[in-house]
Amino acid sequence: MTHTSTKNQAEHGQHTGQNFKKAYLSVRRHEARWREVALQALLQASLGSRYDVKLTGLGAGEADLKPGTDPSPDITIYHEGRIAAEVEVTGTRYPYYAIASKGLWLRPDKLRYALRSPYTERIIYVHLLIPQEFPEGPWLHWLPAKTAILFLDTDHMLELMVTSSSKLREHYVSIPPQVWRRNWQGLIRHIRSLAGDE
């Protein structure tokens, strides 16, 4: 094999890897967008007209997120014009039984945002398994940031390959399923409590 053909193969492999990464990021953005929009609608319907539930994170509800953007929460909930809660939306396409043994995952930068925020108490992480578990299965898991940040350590770091045929890896913080709360009305009560409305 000549040096030129080895170089061409290496360039082809790099090009294929970049194309795969672009395709993967596109799919991930699409999934994230409909999760955010679905949760926004569910929250608005449950909280009622005295609350304003807005997609506010950089790229929230949009298809064209750029890598390395601000990790601020996807949804901001206002009550009487003041911020009551900030909600970070996450999830996966896998059913609950396929992921429960590894815990539910959050990106470390999302947890670091809560650590730096002067308003950690109003940040909530919501992990959705929609549509695969909705409405009968364990589709909802939520956790206040003050609990979630306790898992931001090396013992709970998880490295996952995007697919078995790819060398792309992502890092997450794994939080055991039993730590997460599952009750929808409990989430609504928590938000109302943050707003001083309960």
Image: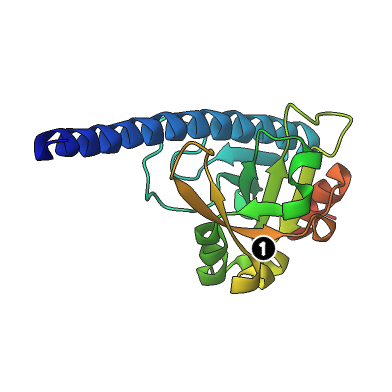
Name the residue beneath numbered marker 1. 145
Amino acid type, residue under disc 1 in the picture: Ala
User: Is 107 or 192 nearer to us in this picture?
Assistant: 107
Q: Is residue 133 above or below residue 57?
A: above
- Residue 181: percent from the left, percent from the top? 83, 54
User: Is 153 or 8 nearer to us in this picture?
Assistant: 8
User: Is 23 or 84 nearer to us in this picture?
Assistant: 23
Q: Quadrant of the C terminus?
A: bottom right
Residue 111 as seen in the image, left or right of residue 183: left
- Residue 127: percent from the left, percent from the top? 70, 45
Q: Splitting the image into 4 quarters, where does residue 19 fall?
A: top left
* Residue located 17% across and 35% down the image: 1
Q: Splitting the image into 4 quarters, where does residue 10 fall?
A: top left
Local packing at callout 1 (Cα closer than 10 Å; few below 14, some 14-19, many 20+) is many
* Residue located 78% across and 52% down the image: 101
Dot 1 falls on a residue whose secondary structure is: helix
User: Is 3 or 96 nearer to us in this picture?
Assistant: 3
